[in-house]
Amino acid sequence: MVALLQVQNLSVGLPFSAPLLDAISFDIAESERVGLVGASGCGKSLTAGTLCGLLRTPLRVLAGSIRLDGTSLTDASPATWRAARGRSVFQIFQSPGTALTPVRRVGTQLAEAAQIAGRDTKAAVSQALDAVALQPDVTGLFPYQLSGGMKQRVLIAMALILRPRLLIADEPTTGLDVLTEHDILTALNTAADETGASVLFISHDLRAVRRIATRTLVMHAGRLVEDADIADLAISKAPAARALATAATALQNPC
Amino acid sequence: MKHVSFFARTTAATLLCLPLAFSAALAENALTIAVKQDRYSVDPEKFTFTTRRPAAQIVETAVKPDENFLPAPLLFQDWDYADGTYTVTLREGVTFSDGTPLNADSTIAALKLYDTGKSDFLQIDQDSFEKLGEYQISFASETGSALVIENMTHRGTSLFGPSEDRAANPVGTGPYLLESYDPNQQITVVRNEAYWGDAPYVDQLTFRFIADDNARLLALQNGEIDIIGEVTPQMLLSMPQDGSVVLHESRPIRYVAMMTNINGEAPFDIMQDRQVREALAWAIDRETIASVLYAGRGEPAKGILPGWMFNLGDTHTDGFGYDTAKAADLLEAAGWTLGSDGIREKDGRKLTLRLVAAYPNVSTVKPMPEMLEQMFADVGVDIDLVEVDDSGVYGSTYLDTGEADLYLEFASNNNTDPTYLLNNLFTTTTPWGGYKFFAPGAHVDALLSDGRKAQTRDEVIEKVRAAHRAIVQDDLVAIPILMVPNFALSRPGVDVPMSEYADWIDYGNVTMVNQ
Amino acid sequence: MIERHLSLPALRFGLRGGRFGLMMGVALLLGFVVLGLSPLFVDIAPPAQMDLLARLAGPSDTHPLGTDHLGRDVLSRLIHAVPVSLGAAFATMLAILAIALPWGVIAAVAGGRVDMVMMRLADIIMAFPTLVLALAIIGFMGASLQASIIGIAAAWWPSNARMVRALVLSASQRDFVRAAYLSGASRLRVIVRHILPQVLPPLAVIISLETASVLLALSALSFLGIGAQPPTPEWGAMLNQARPFFSQAPHMLLVPGLAVTAAVLALNLIGEGLRDLLDTREPYEW
Amino acid sequence: MLDIQGLTKTFYGRAWLRDVSLSIAKGEVVGLIGRSGAGKSTLARCLTGLETADTGTITLNSETITPGRGAARQQMQYLWQDPTQSLSPYLTAQNTVLETLNGFGIGPRAQRLKQARSLLATFDLPQDSFTRRTHALSGGQCQRVALARALAAEPQVLILDEPLSSLDLAAQLSTIRLLQDIHRKRATTMLIVSHDLAPLRHLAHRIVVLDDARIVEDLPMSCFATQAQNPLSRAYAQTLQTDQAEAASLSAHRETEPATGGA
Amino acid sequence: MLRFILIRLAVAVPTLLGMSVVAFAIVAIAPGDPVMMELRALGVVPKPEDIAALRAEYGLDQPFLLRYLDWLGRAVQLDLGTSIATGRSVVTEIAMRLPATLSLAVSALIGAVLVSVVFGVCALSRNRGVAACMRGLTILLVSIPSFWLALLFIYLFVLTIGWGRLVSDGTWSDLILPALTLGLGAGASLGRVVYERIRAELSEDHIRLAIAKGLAPRRILISHIAPRIVGPLATAWANTFGALLGGVVIVESIFGWPGLGQLILQAIAQRDFPVIQAYLVFMGLIFFTMSILADIVVFFTDPQLRRTLSDD
C-alpha cells in the first residue's frame, strides 16, 4: 500500500545557508497516527508548516519531495496548494487563543469550512460540534467569548467538517491546563476516528503524544533522529530520543 | 438639525448658481473681464466710498474726467462756484433704472447718501443742499474747498437712486443693469436698453474674480476670459511674447515710490535724517527697474505726479539719478560707516531698514522689493522686507503705527482734483488726520490748503507744484521710483479703450474683431 | 520556537527592500547635507545677486540650472535653500519633540488622572485638522517662516505626543520592564535602560516620517506665500515665484520641486526602511 | 511566615479572587493549582504588586506589607511564566543579575560582578553565556538567569508563576532539579503556580487548589491523592494515577539501558 | 448602539468646549483691536465716543470668561460675527464656499480610498517585482508635494493636452484635476496604511488558519482581513479627510476652485480674524464629526468592544 504522506529528503531553510530542516524522510500511512517530538527549536513546527505549504518568506524548500495522497506538493503552485489545503491536509495550531478570526462568529467560520469541503453546512456543523462536546449555541458566539480549550475544540470541529486526509496538530495543548488538555486529546482522537484521517501529532511532551499515537518520530536540531514505537524511545540509539524518554519518566514518576 | 438644513440650503444654492456660469458664454457680444478681488458690496449699512466703485457700469458719477483732466459734464450739465457755494444744473431726461427721474430731489438724496455711508470724502455741508429748481441745486463745502466738483470724478462718488436693498438691486443711471451677482465668483451686468446716452457696444459684461495673478494670466491664454483688468508686473514678465496676448496701456500715471517715515520712534527713526533719505534716492537704479518691470513701459520718475497731468510739467522737480558713490558718500556723511559684514553701522547700530511692500498690495510691484533690497545692499543698507497683500493690513499694522522705515506704494492721483493725492497723503489736515509719519509739516499743509481754496486753476496748479517739489525733492518724504501706465491684457482682436483712471476704463465700448 | 531565531534582524538584513530604501534615503539626505555645506568650499554666487539682463535663462555654463525671473542663479538659490528648508523642517520637528516627548512620557509614566487630563488636552488640539489649525495660527500671527514653524509645531505635537505615550506605554508593559523594577532597578534606571531602548527605534521611524510631512507642510505654506517670505531662498517660496513663468522657464519650476520631492523622499525612505528593519513580523503567503 | 487574609480582586466585571486566605510557613513550598482563569496568576501577581487586590491584607513576618513597594519588593521575588519575555534583551546575563545586586545594594559594590558571575555559575550556566544577551540563550537557560536574578535579591519568598509551562521536557526536568537544589541549600519559601499537578510532586509540600477564584482544597502533597474531596481536586489526583500507569510503560526498558541520564 | 453614541457624544462635549476655547482665544488674543478693524472697514475716522460704543457693542469691556461665554452663546446660534473685509456675515461667507470645498475633499477622499486599496493590495502581491514597484511608487507619491503635482498636471493636462480649465466655477468637470492631485497623494499615504494593516493581519495566526483551510486569497482578504481592518482604516480615512480639508487650500488656489481655500488665504492676508475663526470652527466641527463617524465604524466592526460597551 502506498503511504498517504511521503516525505523524502526534505530540506528547508534559507537559500545559501545551513538548512534548518536537514534531509527529513518519513511516511505516514492511511489512518495512521504518528507523534512528532523533540526539544524546543528542533524544527517540529517548521516541518508542520512545510507540509501545509505555510513557509514564510524567505524560508523555502531547498531539496527533497513531499507527496500527499498521490499528489506531489514539491514546488507546487499556489493554486495546487490551495486545492490540497483543507481537503487533503489541515493543521491545528498551537495558541488556540489567536487562531480564530476575532471579528467573525464561530458558526460563520465553521460554515466556511463546510463550504470548502462541499458539505451541507448546517448538518456538518452541528454534527461536528456534537462530536467535540460543544453546545450548538457556540455558533452564535465570537471567539473572544470562548475559553482556550473551547477554541481548540472549535478547531477540531473544523477538522471534522473538512475531513482532511492528513490532520496535523501542532502542539494543540500548549498553554492549556492539564484537565483541558485531556479533553482536547480525547476530541482529537474522536475526530480521527470519525474521519479516518491520518494524524501527525506534534508535541514536546511525550505524555500527550502517548494519548494519540504509538509510532513516534523524534527530531533533534533539524534532523529526524528516531522513528520508533513510543515505548522503545528509552532504548533508542539516538541520545535525543533517550533524553526525552528519561525526562518524561522522571517527571511522571514520583521521586 | 440646524446644521443639516443649513448645509442643504447652501448646497442647493450653489447648485442653482451653476447655470449662471454658462450664461456668459451664450450671450452674443459678451465680454469676460478678470479682476483680482470682489469689491462689490453688499450690506447697505456698509455702503461706503470704496464699496461703491465696483458698481461703475451701473451707476454714474456727476462729472467725468476729460482728456485734459478737467471735469466734464455727465449727470451734471453745468456748474458754478462762487463764494463757497456750488450751483449745479442737472442733465434733463435722465432716469434711474427704476424709472425715477434724475432731478433736484433725487440728486440731493443721492449726494446725502454719503453721510449715511459714514464716508466724508466730498466734505459737503449736509445742511447746505438747496433745491433751486426741478433741475437745479446748490450746496456748499464744509471746508471751503473749491474742488468738490473735481473730486466728483472719483467713481466712489457715483450717484445711486433710491432703493431698499442697494446690494441686490443697485439703481443707477448707467449703461448697464445688474444681471447676477455671485459673491467672490463673478458679477454680470447687461445692457440697459433705456440708457439715456450712447448705447455701449458690448451687450453683457462679466467680471470674474480671480485672486491669483498667475491664474488670471493662464486663464486668458487658455481662452477662458477676454480681458485682464488688473495687470501685475509679474504677469508682464511672464506674458507670452508670441502675440497670443495683447497689452493695452494708457499714459503713465501711476507712481511707484517709497514713502519715508520721518516722524517715527526708535527703532524706526533712522529716516529722520534727510541725508539717509537722499542716499537711498541715489541708490536706486531706476533705468534698470524700468527696463525690466512693467514690460519696459514705465519711466524713471522725478516725482509722484506725471508731468503731463494738469500741465504740471516736470521742470519743478530735479529728481535723482543712479549714483552709488554719491549714495555711499551721503551715508558716510551721515555717520553710517561700512561694517565688516557689508552693512553700515553707526554707534553700534546696524543700518537696517524695514521696507513694507506694498500699497495696495505687493503683487502690484512684485518683484521690485527684492530688486530694491539688492540695490540698497550694494550701498551697505540692510533691508528687512515685509510683504503685505492687503491694504488694510498695510494701513493698520504698519502705516498707522509707524512701525516701518519705508513704505513702497503703487498708486495715483485718480480724480481731477490736482491736490487730491498730495492732500490725502502728506498733510495732517484731512478728516482722517493724514498720514502723520510722512507728512513734512505745516508748510506743506499750508500750500495744499491754499491750493484747495484757490479761486483760479492756475493758482491751484502753482501751489500743487510747490507742494510736490517739497515732497519729492526738498523734504524728500517720498522717494520717486517709476511712473507707470495703466495696463490691460486681452486676447488678440480686442481693443480696450484705456483710461489713465482704472475706474474709468470703458469696458462697455471694447471693440472686438473676431468674436 | 524556530520562529524566534528567524526573527533576529541580523538574519534578515539584506533580504528585504527596506535596506535598499534606507541606504537610498541616507544617501539622498547626505547629498543634501553636502549640497547645503558646499558654499563653504566652493565659490557659489550669492543667492540674491541679480543679473537682470540674464533673466529666465535656461541652464548654461555660468548658471548650471539657469536663472530666475530676476536673473538670480537657480543653483545658488537651491543650495542656499537647503539650510533654510531642511533647517526649518528639523527645527519644527525639534519643537514638536520638545513638547511631544515630555508630554507623552509624563502622561504614560504618571498614568491615572494626570494622563487623562494631558491626553484630553492633546485631543482638543487634535480635533482640528492639522493644516487648518496651522493656517489659523499663521493667520493670527501674520505670514512668516517663523509663524509657519510655530503653526505647524502647534498643530503637529499632539499626535506625536500620543504616539510617544503609546510607545512608552507599550514598552513599559513588557514583562521584562516590570520584572526589572520588581528585581530592584530604580524607576529612572527602568526608564533609561529598559524603556528608552525600546522606544528609540520606533521613535526614529516616527521622527523620520513626521519630518517628511513637516517639510511638505512647510514648503506648501511657503508656496502659498504664507511661509518663508521672499527673497529668502526656500524651495516652496522658489516654486511660488516660479509659477508665473512655468511655460517660459520650466527649469525654475522643476528644480525646487525636485528638491522638495527628493528631500521628502529621503526622509520617507529612511523612515520606511527603518520600519522594515524593525519589523519582526513574518506575513504568511497565501 | 507569609500570611494572606481575605484577598479579593474584581475586574472586567468578574471576580478573580474571592476572599482568599492562605498562610505559608518559613521554608515551605506550596503548589497552587487550578484551571486556567481560576485566579492562580492573579493571586501570584497580587503578592508581588503587579496587581493590587481590592481588599485583604498581606503580612510577612507579622508585618503588613504593600507588595512591590519598599522592603517587600526585595523580600518577595517573582519568577515570570515566560523567561524569554521577562529578561531585558538589552542586558547580558551577568548584567541582569548585577542590576538586582546594585538595585538592592547587596554585597560590597566592587564584589558584585564577581558575585553575579558566581551565582550564574552555581545555576549550571556555562561561562560563555554570562556576557551574552539573553535572546541568544535557550528557554531553559533564560529560566536559570531569571532564577539567578530572583535569588540574587536574597528574597524571603519566591513566587513562581507556571515556571515550567513554556519549557520543553528536558528543560522542565532540569528546572525542577534546580528548584529542588535551591530549596535544599537555601530553604527558600516558595509559592509555585501550576496548571498541572505532576511536576509539583517533586517540589511542593502542600497543594492548594483554586477554583472559580476560591480555595477549594488545601492538603499536604503526601496525602493529596488519597484525601482530596473536591471534584476538581479528584480530577487532578486522577491525572497522577494515569500518568504513573503510562510512565510504567515508558520505563519498562529502563533496566536494560541504564546510565544515560537527563538533559 | 444608541448607548455607544450617547457615551461617545458625552465624551465629545469637553473636547468640543476645549475646541471652542481654542477657536475663541485665537481671535480674542489676536493682535489688533477688533474695534479699530471695524472702523477701518467703514473707512471712517473714529471719535472716542464711537470707539467706546463699539467696545461696548463687542463686549470688550467684559472679562475674558464672560466674553467667551457670550461668544459661545452666539456661536451655537451660528452667529460668528462679520467679515472685516467684506462686511458679510462670516457664516454666509463660509457657507458660500463650503459646498465646493466639501465636494472637493469628499471626491478626493473617495479617490484616495480607491487608490489606497489598489496600492496597498498590489504592494502585497506575490510577484516581487510588482510589489517592489508599488511600494516604491507609493513612497514617491507620498513624497511629491501636492502643489508641485498640481502644477505638473496643469502643465500636462491643461496647457499641453488641453483638457480642463484653469478658472473653475464649481462644475463637476473642473473637479477632476484637483481631486486627482489630492487623491493621489492622500491615496498613497492611505495605501501605506492599507499595506501595513494587511501585512500585520497576514502575520496573524487566524490568517494562517484561514490559509490552512484552503481559502482563496480573495476570500481571505474579503472575509477575514477586511472586517478586521475596516475599523482602523475608517480612523485613517477620517484623519485623511482632516488632512484633505487642509490640503484643499493648496490645490484650490492653484486650480482656482471656488472653495474655502481662497477665502482663508485672503483672510490671512487681510488679517480677517472673524473669518479665520469661523473657518477653524467649521473645519474643526466637520473633522470632529468625521472622527465620531469613524469611531462608530470601529465600534461596529469590533464585536468585543460592542459587547463591553453595551453590557457595562
Image: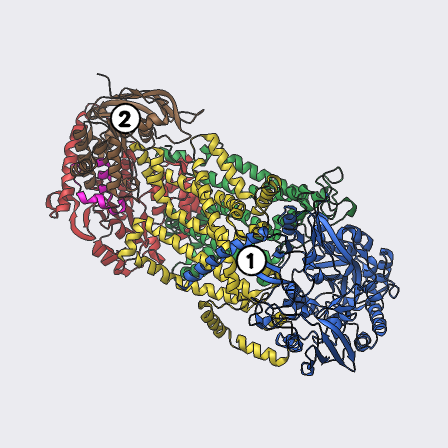
Query: Local crowd at mark 2 within 10 Å, few (<14), some, or many (≥20)?
Result: many
Q: Quadrant of residue A102?
A: top left
Callout 1 secondary element:
helix
Q: Which residue is mark 1?
A: C135
The chain holding disc 1 is: C
Q: How many marks?
A: 2
Chain shaded blue: B
The residue under label 2 is which amino acid type? Answer: Val
Q: Seen in the image, is C168 located left or right of residue B145?
A: left
Chain shaded green: C
The residue under label 1 is which amino acid type? Answer: Leu
Q: Seen in the image, is C99 located left or right of residue B62?
A: left
Query: Local crowd at mark 1 within 10 Å, few (<14), some, or many (≥20)?
Result: many
Inspect this view and state whether residue D116 appears.
yes
Q: Quadrant of residue C106?
A: bottom left
- Secondary structure mostly seen in magenta is helix
The percent coordinates of residue A170 (x first, y second) are 28, 33
Q: Colour of chain E?
A: yellow
Magenta residue span: A131-157
Q: On the same chain: label 2 and label 1? A: no
Q: Colour of chain A?
A: brown
Nearest the viewer among C86 and B321 is B321
Identify the residue at horizontal 64%, vertical 71% (top origin): E43
* In this view, the mark in front (2 or 1): 1
Chain shaded red: D
The percent coordinates of residue E2 (x first, y second) are 30, 58
Inspect this view and state whether residue D11 appears.
no
Nearest the viewer among C167 and C221 is C221
Q: Which residue is mark 2?
A: A218
Nearest the viewer among D6 and A223 is A223
